[in-house]
Image: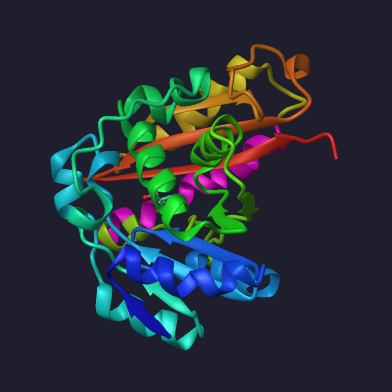
Amino acid sequence: MITIKSSSQLQNILEEDLSKNEKIGFVPTMGALHKGHLELVNQAQKENKVVVVSIFVNPTQFNNPNDLQNYPRTLDYDLKKCEEADVDYVFTPSEQEIYPTPDKRIFDFGLLSKVMEGKHRPGHFNGVAQVVSRLFDIVKPTNAYFGQKDFQQLAVIRKMVADYNYNTNIVACPTVREEDGLAMSSRNKLLTPSHRKSAPLIAKTLFAARNKMQEMSVKELTNWVITEINNDPLLEVEYFEIANAQTLKPINNWNDAKNLVGCIAVQAGEVRLIDNVLFKTDN
Ligand code: PAF
């Protein structure tokens, strides 16, 4: 495994693979690696000759300065995990390396970036698009791997790739969960023991909701999920929306779209958790 800080150095190294038409798999991360990230690496290794992992806590995607400051940073541990996983290159750029000048680009992803996370974290997806486009320009990956836990992020990145003609295939990997159902996230490390105990109620409720589709209207089920989770005094739902899984447009009736996703954000003390569940798919 080689750790590289400079984008030009990484580009020089990857140039040889690109010239031989070798497949480059890319796993962009903000570090604090967990099993979910390692699953992305594993998938990338199956489908590519070379695997690059980036570790960069991207300031432009944080709408809250405290959140940026408190975001877990565990570089030594992350490098050890990448080494154990036999990653080829780990890219650990500085902020200066990614943004030599302030990134003023404004992306427009329409509704996809305006609902749910987009509404509650203004500017978040613009920052994600800034960093992911910059990283794609450097790495020029054949395939890039993202977790389905960040459902809306995946939709936004797919749109970015389509709108800006990136030659990268986006691969979505299933959410990896703790044994008690909690979706793995770097932020889980920040939960207090009592919030950690309460947090699995989020996934439990989402899965239970899937079985109640026949009994309730969309509105009733939405309210049921919110009430169920808010019944725990340590959890507070910020939003829960059932939407068309392609456009993310909220639906009113179960037949409004073939693919439906329920997306949720919950405040657990100081930590904001997100999760989602597919309600209906056409395959
Ligand atoms: O999902 C994440 O960890 C980040 O949003 C990403 C895609 C690495 C961009 O900073």
Q: In the figure, residue 144 lies in which quadrant?
A: bottom right
User: What is the number of callouts on the image?
Assistant: 0
Q: Is residue 232 in sight in this rendering?
A: no
**Could you tell me which residue is drawn at 27 percent across and 55 percent down?**
57
| Residue stretch in magenta | 191-212
Residue 197 image point, x, y percent: 37, 58
Q: Is residue 29 left or right of residue 280?
A: left
Q: Is residue 10 left or right of residue 228?
A: left
188 lies above or below 265: below
Residue 116 image point, x, y percent: 44, 26
Most distant residue in the top direction: 252
Residue 156 image point, x, y percent: 52, 34
**Main secondary structure type of the part rendered in magenta:** helix
31 lies above or below 89: above
In the rendered image, which quarter contains the N terminus? bottom left
State yes or no: residue 209 in magenta: yes
Q: Is residue 118 in sight in this rendering?
A: yes
**Could you tell me which residue is drawn at 64 percent across and 53 percent down?**
171
Q: Nearer the viewer, residue 191 or 83?
A: 83
In the rendered image, which quarter contains the C terminus? top right
Q: Nearer the viewer, residue 153 or 216?
A: 153
Q: In the figure, residue 91 lies in which quadrant?
A: bottom left
**Could you tell me which residue is drawn at 25 percent across and 37 percent down?**
103
Q: Is residue 137 left or right of residue 259?
A: left
Residue 123 image point, x, y percent: 30, 28
**Could you tell me which residue is drawn at 54 percent across and 53 percent down?**
146
